[in-house]
Image (spheres, rainbow, N blue to C red):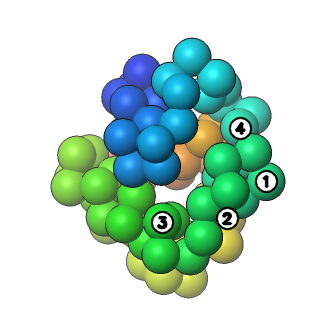
C-alpha cells in the first residue's frame, strides 16, 4: 500500500518518489497547500475506495498518516 500512496503523492505534488517516506510531511516537506491536499485526498478516495470526510483531513499530516487512515477505513 505504501508504494501506491507514494505514487499518488508523487503524481499529485510533482515530488520525487525516491524522497517520499512514511514520515514525509505534506505541508513541510512537500510544500502542499490546501488545494493540493484536497486533490490528493480525492485521488486516495478514488484509488482505495474510502471516504475521507473534511473533518478528518487535519489528521493526515504525513504519508504514514494516510497509510494508517486508509488501512483502518478500507471496506
Residue underneath mark 2: 59
Q: Is mark 3 on a helix, strand or loop?
A: helix
Residue sitting at x 48%, y 81%: 54
Say which of marks 2 and 4 sits in front: 4
Q: Residues within 10 Å of mark 2 (few under 14, many from 20)?
A: few
Q: Is mark 4 on a helix, strand or loop?
A: loop
Where residue 68 sits in the image (x, y, percent)? 57, 42
Specify the quadrant that holds the N terminus.
top left
Say which of marks 2 and 1 sits in front: 1
Q: How crowded is mark 4: few (under 14 residues within 10 Å), some or many (20 or more)?
A: some
Q: How far apart are marks 3 and 1 (CA)?
A: 13 Å
Along the viewing direction, whichever of 13 and 54 lies nearer the viewer: 13
Residue sitting at x 45%, y 37%: 10
Say which of marks 4 and 3 sits in front: 3
Q: Distance between the residues labelled 3 and 2?
A: 16 Å
Residue underneath mark 4: 24
Q: How far apart are marks 4 and 3 (CA)?
A: 15 Å
Residue underneath mark 3: 36
Q: How far apart are marks 2 and 1 (CA)?
A: 15 Å
Q: How far apart are marks 1 and 4 (CA)?
A: 8 Å
Amino acid at each position: 500500500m505504501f508504494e501506491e500512496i507514494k505514487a499518488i503523492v508523487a503524481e499529485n505534488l510533482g515530488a520525487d518518489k525516491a524522497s517520499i517516506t512514511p514520515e514525509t510531511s505534506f505541508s513541510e516537506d512537500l510544500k502542499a497547500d490546501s488545494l493540493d491536499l484536497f486533490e490528493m485526498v480525492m485521488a486516495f478516495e478514488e484509488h482505495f475506495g474510502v471516504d475521507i470526510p473534511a473533518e478528518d483531513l487535519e489528521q493526515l499530516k504525513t504519508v504514514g498518516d494516510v497509510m494508517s487512515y486508509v488501512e483502518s477505513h478500507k471496506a
